[in-house]
Image (tube, helix red, strand yellow):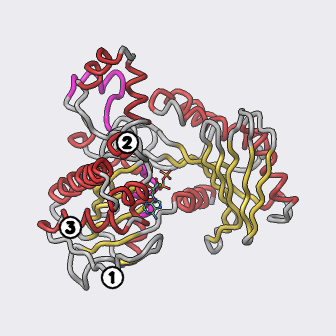
Amino acid sequence: MKVMSINAGSSTLKFSLFNMDDESVIASGNFERIGMEGSFYTIKYRGEKVEQDVTLENHLDAINILLERLVSLSIISSLDEIKAIGHRIVNGGSLYQESVLITDKVIEDLILLKDYAPLHNPAHVLGIKACKEALPEVPMVAVFDTAFHQTMDPVNYLYPVPYSWYQEYGVRKYGAHGTSHRYIAKTISDILGKKDLKIISCHLGSGASVCAIKDGKCVDTSMGFTPLAGVMMGTRSGDIDPSIIPFVMEKEGKNASEIIDDLNHHSGLLGVSRTSNDMRDIVAGMNEGNENCTLAAKKFDRTVVNYIASYYVLLGGCDVLCFTAGIGENSLETRMRIVELLRPLGFELDIEANNCRGELKKISKGKKKPLIYVVPTNEELMIARDTKRLVR
Ligand code: ADP
């Protein structure tokens, strides 16, 4: 059974086509700069890579070209082979606790939920509508980044603000990266052959979040009402005192959305290091003795460790600590520094085993608990799995 997973952004559309009989990737790629000058696409399949400049006025253009290319490149022999499409959705609010088959009602809900993810949900709707127009008979599934976090207790998802903000406007923690954290929890549970596990999952990429998972369910997570909250990230601040916002607005003569833009795009590793939002550059700067890079790396570690320690207490211990995403999977130095800070809780790294990038591996010493793992995340596969399950 062939299933496509789609991640539609405001000017991009990423896809992966899976053969779900063995979960192998048949093809994957990106359409970029949709609706802008200089749009192009990349398709990878059977070790080949096709890259071409094309005019992409909208998401429907991208979908139509993708479908045409899948056949003309002989990746599939006919569009009938695509049995289902799964869409990544950033925010399903409190409405969606799990993945669902897409109906007109789901599309209406996504439009209503746009305030919770203004950059993402409208783009997802464009992607869904384009697929519906191009392949009207093919069932589609929505897979929400927020759904995994819907098992949080109100004590963990409520903010200590006037209760009416929650009741009237839905102000609460929704979290993000749920599909990734769910994939990590499932992979670890499969490896250890156990469901009753206390897992702390660290998704450390450009965006970063930590998630406390008990028996396969999310108990708490570091991202909040939006993905701006929680640990320090590539360009996002993570948690800060909200009083800073009006203070800097006045100092710099900026409005609230300009400050939020600073917190989203000019903060985090980039803000503190004044050099780069990429952990590779930060580590290189640190090795060269650059003070701001050193400070940025240490601050990053500190914010991640604070969440891990707090979730250790929340879960009443930890069986497995996991690292995933760009930094978590690849930055040996970051993993080493973070685990060193966690030594008082009994975490200990096997330095030799930690010498790995992008592979599933246990990196803690012997059988000593808590175990520590690197798990390459695979949100696209999780989307395709849910899609296959729901369509069947
Ligand atoms: P996104 O949230 O965009 O999907 P990724 O999960 O791809 O982000 O993570 C991107 C980040 O991963 C980069 O900004 C970089 O800091 C980090 N990264 C990737 N490779 C390495 C590496 N070899 N060493 C250290 N950091 C890395």
Q: Mark 3 belongs to which amino acid?
A: Glu
Q: Residues within 10 Å of mark 1 (few under 14, many from 20)?
A: few
Q: How crowded is mark 3: few (under 14 residues within 10 Å), some or many (20 or more)?
A: some
In this rendered view, identify the residue nearer to me: 305 or 89: 305
Q: Mark 1 belongs to which amino acid?
A: Glu
Specify whether 238 is left or right of 162. Answer: right
- Residues at marks 3 and 1 touching, judged by CB atoms closer than 8 Å: no
Secondary structure of the residue carrying tag 2 is: loop
Query: Magenta region: which residues?
Result: 161-185
Secondary structure of the residue carrying tag 1 is: loop
Q: Position of residue 368 (x, y in %)?
A: 21, 81
Residue bearing the label numbered 3: 340
Residue bearing the label numbered 1: 352
Residue bearing the label numbered 2: 274
* Image point (49%, 42%), residue name: 90
Q: Where is residue 257 in the image (x, y as percent from the top left)?
A: 42, 22
- Residues at marks 3 and 2 touching, judged by CB atoms closer than 8 Å: no
Q: Position of residue 386 (x, y in %)?
A: 55, 58
